[in-house]
Image (spheres, rainbow, N blue to C red):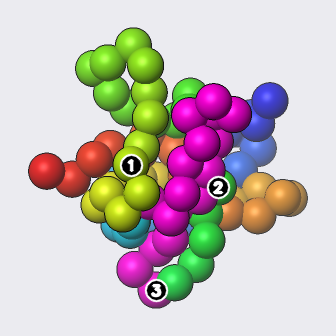
Amino acid sequence: MFQVSNALNLFAGGKMAQGKVKWFDSKKGYGFLVTSDGKDVFVHFADVVSDDSYKTLNEGADVEFELLEDKKGLKAANVKLIK
């Protein structure tokens, strides 16, 4: 499992990145977001903030998130839908 403490937060000072859901497979529990500058970012269902017990993201939905980088690449944390 990914350890947030081992990651570098690329948006220090509380600024959130924004982007869109590229795809998300709710059966597998993960997918990818794309940032506003075109970078792919991995997202795991555990990092989706939702009031629903079943966490999923719809393709094309606007989101904001913390952008982290670890040895595997870019990862999203605290992903929230922009309404």
As rendered, which of 76 and 24 lies closer to the eye? 24
Q: How busy is the neighbourhood of tag 1: few (under 14 within 10 Å), some, or many (20 plus)?
A: some
Q: Are dots 2 and 3 in contact, CB under 8 Å?
A: no
Image point 44% across, 27% down: which residue?
55
Q: Which mark is residue 58?
A: 1
Does the magenta portion include 27?
yes
Secondary structure under badge 2? strand
Q: Are dots 2 and 1 in contact, CB under 8 Å?
A: no
Magenta residues (range): 21-37
Question: Which residue is identified by label 2?
Answer: 42
Image point 44% across, 35% down: which residue?
56
Secondary structure under badge 3? loop
The amino acid type found where label 3 is placed reads Asp
As rendered, which of 17 and 25 lies closer to the eye? 25
- How far across and down, in percent of the image, does residue 9 sit? 57, 57
Q: Choose the circle earlier in sequence order: 3 or 1.
A: 3
**Picture quadrant where residue 45 is located:** top right
Image point 13% across, 50% down: which residue?
83
58 w.r.t. 13: above or below: above
Q: How busy is the neighbourhood of tag 2: few (under 14 within 10 Å), some, or many (20 plus)?
A: many
Image point 56% across, 28% down: which residue?
46
Q: Choose the circle earlier in sequence order: 2 or 3.
A: 3
Question: Which residue is identified by label 3?
Answer: 37
